[in-house]
Amino acid sequence: MLVILTILCGFLIGISIVSSGSSSPIGRYTGIVTAPIQKGLNRLGSFLGSFSSSLTDAAALKAENEELLAKVDTLTAENSKLVLDKEELERLQTLLDLRNQYSELDIVAAHVISRGSGNWFNTFTIDKGSADGIKVDCNVLAGAGLVGIVTSVGRNWARVRAIIDDDSNVSAMVSTTSDTCIIAGNLELIDQGTLSLVKLTDDNNHVHVGDKVVTSSISEKFLPGILIGYISELNNDANNLTKSGQLTPVVDFRHLQEVLIIRTLKVYVPSEETPEEKASGLEGWIDIELPGMETEPSSESASPSA
Amino acid sequence: MKRKIVLLFLCLSAAFLETSFLDYLEIASIRPNLQVILTTSFALMCGVKSGMGVGFTAGLFLDVVSGGILGYNALILTWIGYLAGIAYRIFYDDDIKTPLILIAATDLLFCFYQYMTTFMFRGRIHFFFYLKRIIIPEMLYTAMLAVVIYQLNFWINKKLPLEGRRRAPGERI
């Protein structure tokens, strides 16, 4: 029996590795059933959590309430002033055609309903899926910054890998200098609340601690310009060419309840081309290169003397 | 039959609790491992065959619900059910110390398996960091929770019809 079950497990592992990426049919259909149950359990859990905390702070809440009521008055006054300012800002923005990049994106909100199993990985499931227009590789935001990326999707659920996951690598750049780097999740840094920042090319030493890091424009999957966090530590690598350090993310991953999913996918050019376009593009390239190559046999074209 | 249905239900609910509800019981972002508790306790109470069955089912449900590689958790939990099932012939199940030690040991095994397969092969070789930060806390937390859950499982096991249950001491071979 042990042997049979072991072989069966091995078989299943093999199947799911081979068909990974586009989620396997079993996972896709069970997800449709399990997502509502997880949603309910999650709601129960958050209800119990808020219930227990409300018991403990009842006295403190009364004092806080009075304080807050006073604050509401001042804020209402302030708000009406801000609304005026905002209208003015919008008018000026349209005038200058400098609309915020995020506001043009197609965004949908979702709740986090379950986490991945075990203590090793930081993945979670949300309660929106392909029925709401979510696709694999959609970027996920929360409040100010980047949370992660959709790795698999079903009809009413989608699985997201957070950028703090040990498996995650995000191509990023420093917003001031546009120097590129990689933001890699690292379980060893999770307690410090940081991510590791590697392969930063900064030849002129213009990058400093505290600089803003955003997703890079050369990333295949992440839309450019999404805020990730701020550099908190920076050191030279042993090779003296690149730098590495740590980055503090702007998102609070411990208390993630609602996230925003950008339905606009990053347009990655090679996959957009039709085969004909590709072929014609290649021919054009050969046409241009051939006159220069005619004097040399193509096999030696790599040598500098040519 | 009734026994199988109840066990199936236990495995299924463990998978759901593990992936959603246990978030609220996390201590220092460490979650206890319900699957290991379930598998080891039924293996100790009912023997190798039941242990493997429960382990395989619980693991498979966890894989399906959490959306990982199918069979990944089922494999190790089947083995845990087998190994803990060996203890069925050696120990009695009504003393809490034996199951606690056994659950801690099997959870350790589970963590080593996860570390080896998912972290070590990717070059994350600071084993002692992971031991201190994840493996030992998870083991302790799981053992702590097992004090309660083992009693519950023990009670459920007693209520269930006899098929495959531990024989009375006089009948033991």
Image (spheres, coloured by chain):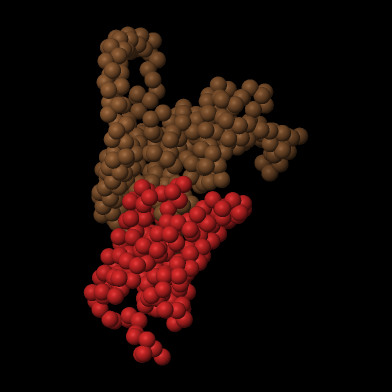
Chain colours: A brown, B red
Residue B40, percent across and down?
42, 69
Where residue A5 sits, quadrant-wise, is bottom left
Number of labelled discs?
Answer: 0
Which residue is painted at 66% across and 33% down in the image?
Answer: A235
Tell me the quadrant of the picture where the N terminus of chain A can be found: bottom left
Q: Residue furthest right?
A: A305
Residue A233, percent across and down?
61, 32
Which residue is painted at 56% across and 53% down in the image?
Answer: B132
> Along the line of sight, which residue is nearer the eye, A220 or A209?
A209
Q: Is residue A133 left or right of residue B142?
A: left
Query: Does residue A12 appear anywhere in the picture?
Result: no
Up the image or down, A142 lies above or below A158; here it is above
> Along the line of sight, which residue is nearer the eye, A295 or B151?
B151
Q: Is residue A2 left or right of residue A31?
A: right
Which residue is painted at 43% across and 44% down in the image?
Answer: A161
Where residue A243 sits, quadrant-wise, is top right
> Along the line of sight, which residue is nearer the eye, A117 or B138?
B138
Where residue B72 sits, quadrant-wise, is bottom left
Query: Does residue B128 appear anywhere in the picture?
Result: yes
Residue A145, percent across and down?
43, 31
Up the image or down, B49 lies above or below A277; here it is below
Up the image or down, A148 lies above or below B169; here it is above
Up the image or down, A141 lies above or below A188; here it is above
Residue A260, percent across and down?
34, 34
Which residue is painted at 32% across and 66% down in the image?
Answer: B152
Tell me the quadrant of the picture where the C terminus of chain A can be found: top right
